[in-house]
Image (cartoon, rainbow, N blue to C red):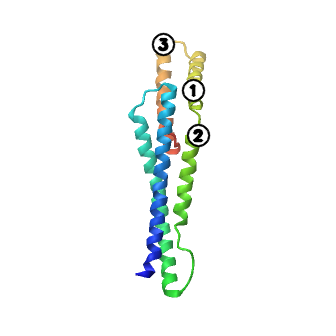
Amino acid sequence: MKEFNVLFIALFILVGFLLTPLIFIALDFWSGVRKAKQRGEKITSDGWTRTVAKIGRYYNMLFAFVVVDSMQIAGVWYLDTYYDYHVPIFPWLTMIGACIVAAIEIRSIFEKAEDKVKKQVSDVSSLAENIAKNISSPAEIAQAVVNYMNTNDLKTTQDEGKSTTDQ
């Protein structure tokens, strides 16, 4: 049983690495709620939805790293146990993945609430400028607004695949 102790320790470390992103995601969600309240926005289920989607994306990556680390740990343990080949048994890729997630979430936590408002104002002013330049009839204006909203929804959906901010 003594030869399995190192595997239990590696498993314990691995679980710790997998819990770390959840803590940072929760902190980012809390920060996003605070920022939304600061901007006077209504808190809706959208933030929860984005957070759940974010958790899924992060853990897809982390579980892939866990599989690779498990193969590495099993191989190194076998060589260490039966062939006296000494290499540290440690989940390196999962640790790196957890650090990357933590860095992304920390950056998101420290983003200013005003930066999002500035981006939204910039987007709306761009739309208004485009409408004023090119469109004369009310039907064309309505169509331009619908097109903008559809494009913005598509962009938001695509950004959710890349973005890590909650609010």
Q: Pointer 2 and pointer 3: residues touching (CB < 8 Å)? A: no
- Assess whether mark 1 and mark 3 are in contact (beta carbons under 8 angstroms): no
Circle 3 or circle 1, nearest the eye: 1
Residue name at image x 47 percent, y 26 percent: 41
Judging from the image, what secondary structure is the residue with disc 2 in?
Answer: helix
The vertical placement of 93 against 81, above or below, is above
Residue at image x 50%, y 38%? 31
Residue at image position (46%, 15%) is 139
Cα gap from disc 2 to disc 1, whole angstroms: 22 Å
* Amino acid type of the residue tagged 3 in the rendering: Pro
For the residue pair 9 and 115, the one nearer the viewer reads as: 9
| Residue 147 image position (x, y, % from top left) | 48, 26
Q: Residue furthest left?
A: 45
Mark 2 or 1 closer to N-term? 2
Mark 3, residue position: 138
Q: Residue at x 57, y 81 (%)?
A: 86
Q: Is residue 167 visible?
A: no
User: Which residue is the site of mark 2?
Assistant: 110
Residue position for label 1: 123
Quick check: can you spot residue 91?
A: yes
Q: How many neighbours does mark 2 have within 10 angstroms: few (below 14), some (14-19), or many (20 or more)?
A: few
Q: Secondary structure at mark 3?
A: helix
Whole-number angstrom distance, CA of label 3 to CA of label 1: 21 Å
Question: In the image, residue 88 lies at what x, y percent?
Answer: 56, 74
For the residues carrying marks 2 and 3, which lies nearer the camera in this image? 2
Q: Percent from the top left, x then y, of residue 33?
A: 47, 34
Q: CA distance from mark 2 to mark 3?
A: 42 Å
Mark 3: give few (<14), some (14-19) or many (20+) Cα within 10 Å: few
Q: Which mark is residue 136?
A: none
